[in-house]
Every structure is written in structure tokens, then in C-alpha cells.
Amino acid sequence: MNSKKIIFTDKAPAPIGPYSQAVLIGDTLYTSGQVALNPSTMELVMDDIETETKQVMENMKAVLEAAEMNFGNVVKTSIFIIDMGDFARINSVYSTYFDEATAPARETVQVAGLPKGVNIEISMIAVK
């Protein structure tokens, strides 16, 4: 049986509840959802949806790096957004982190609300 390894980095926001930034089982990493918290100040970065999305992706990058992975290892993303009208603007930022030819599977879901009143939350699954 593969052992469960908790992944933590101070380069991403610290968990604010009973969860981990990510859990590694064997070669598979399951991340918690990231929102646009600046990890050094724990303040939200919500100037506009592009800036918010970039902060989320940078937080996710830090978590992946803490597990010795990168966006090339990501096989699945889940994106939760408040307004589907923001999808094109979110996608323009998100797409800069992946090679389109090898981009992960993904779903994007509009939700009624997200923690701390944010507009976007993203979680990922990655494999070494």
C-alpha cells in the first residue's frame, strides 16, 4: 500500500481549516482548491479576474513544486467560478500555464458561492 504524504509549502497560502494543501499517494498528487490569497500576507488578490486567476495559478505552481512536480504533470483540473461570463478572461490566463497539445482534462463549473467571496477556485490532480 502506498503511504500518504502531506505536501506543505509556505509559498502557497496556509490551510485555514482541517485540510492539507495537497496529498501525495504514490505518484499521484491531489491538491486542495486554491483561491487568490497572497501567501505572504494572506490577503486576497482580487483586482480583476485575470489578476485573481494568476494568483490562484501561482499558488498552485508552488504546491506542485513542493511535490517536485510542475504543470506538465497535471492530468486533471477542476475550476469553480462565480460567473461563467468570466470564462474567456480566466482561460486566457490559465492557458499560459499549459501546453495546449498536452493540456490536462478539465471541467469548469459555475457555482453559487466560494470561500471568502472569491470569484475562482482551482484544484488539480497531477502524476509523476
Image (tube, rainbow, N blue to C red):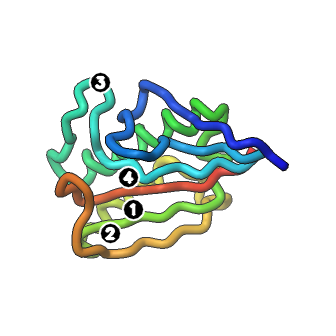
Amino acid type, label 4: Val
Is the residue marked by circle 2 packed among few (<14), some (14-19), or many (20+) residues within 10 Å? some
Residue 111 rendering spot, x and y as whole percentages: 29, 74
> Which of the two labelled residues, at mark 2 and mark 3, occupies the earlier sequence position?
3
Amino acid type, label 3: Ser
Q: Quickly name the residue at label 3.
A: 40
In the rendered image of this protein, does residue 18 appear above or below residue 112?
above
Residue 125 rendering spot, x and y as whole percentages: 61, 55
Q: Distance from label 1 to label 4 (Cα)? A: 5 Å
Amino acid type, label 2: Phe
Pair 1/3: label in front: 3
Label 1 residue SS: helix
Residue 91, label in figure: 1
> Which of the two labelled residues, at mark 1 and mark 3, occupies the earlier sequence position?
3
Q: Distance from label 1 to label 2 (Cα)? A: 6 Å
Q: Quickly name the residue at label 2.
A: 87
Q: Distance from label 2 to label 3 (Cα)? A: 28 Å
Q: Residue at x 32, y 50 (%)?
A: 53
Q: Distance from label 3 to label 4 (Cα)? A: 22 Å
Pair 3/4: label in front: 3
Q: Quickly name the residue at label 4.
A: 93
Label 2 residue SS: helix
Quadrant of the rendered structure where residue 36 is? top left
Amino acid type, label 1: Asn
CB atoms at circles 1 and 4 under 8 Å apart? yes
Residue 106 rendering spot, x and y as whole percentages: 54, 68
